[in-house]
Amino acid sequence: MSGMRIRSCTIALTLLLVALQSVAAGPLSNRRAPGFSLMDTQGRHHDLYDYRGKLVLIEIMQTNCPHCREFAKILSQVSAKYGDRVVILTVVNPPDNAETVSRYLAEVKPSYPILFDCGQMAISYFKATPQNPSVSVPHIFLIDANGWIVDDYGYGPATKDIFEGKGLFSVLDKLLAAKPAGKK
């Protein structure tokens, strides 16, 4: 009987951990998304406020990052599956420039805009400071219809399914199915 009890406890603990992981937000989440207005490769400005009422996926990347290039395929699938229900905005920072982004666009052919940041937007999203200047790519921020960062993911072993598999689709399905929270 005690073996069965241990097995039941182990199963219950495993289910609890899986449930906690599925609702646990990243360390840069659970706060209002910092506002920005950034220009894309066509000279159009994208202001985060203009996307209120929609789920926004912001990717911060570099054009020479191999993981970012692979993730572009996932983002194209997201764009095709969800259409205008999910806004995708990709943001690059120096040393990327018009030339490196033009080459990237020709090679990868993303269906979503690439925005140019001088670093200020990325720093505010990463909460970077002189003491902690860390900004890692690729990194995505999921912003709900009310303008709150509900989750964020940086590339790594624990998030491999988000960046290389179907994990992002599960997360987006849950967020789109959830009723918007009334955060202020």
Image (tube, rainbow, N blue to C red):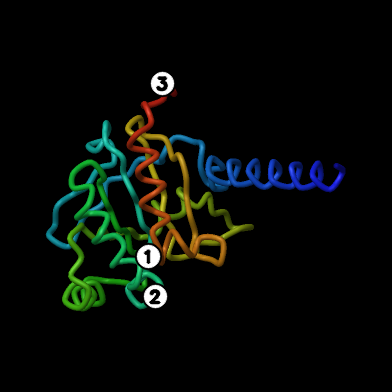
Query: Left of 158 or right of it: where is 58?
Result: left
Query: Left of 151 or right of it: where is 80?
Result: left
45 or 167, nearer to the observer: 167
43 or 25, nearer to the observer: 25
134 or 154, nearer to the observer: 154
Q: Residues within 10 Å of mark 3 (few under 14, many from 20)?
A: few
> What residue is shown with label 2?
65
> What residue is shown with label 1?
61
Rounded to the nearest whole Å, what is the CA distance between mark 1 and mark 2? 7 Å
State the residue lying farthest toward the front.
Answer: 1
State the residue lying farthest toward the right.
Answer: 2
Callout 1–callout 2 Cβ contact below 8 Å: yes
Q: Residue at x 42, y 35 (%)?
A: 148
Q: Residues within 10 Å of mark 1 (few under 14, many from 20)?
A: many
Q: Name the image quarter holding residue 101.
A: bottom left
Rounded to the nearest whole Å, what is the CA distance between mark 3 and mark 2? 37 Å
Q: Name the image quarter holding residue 76.
A: bottom left
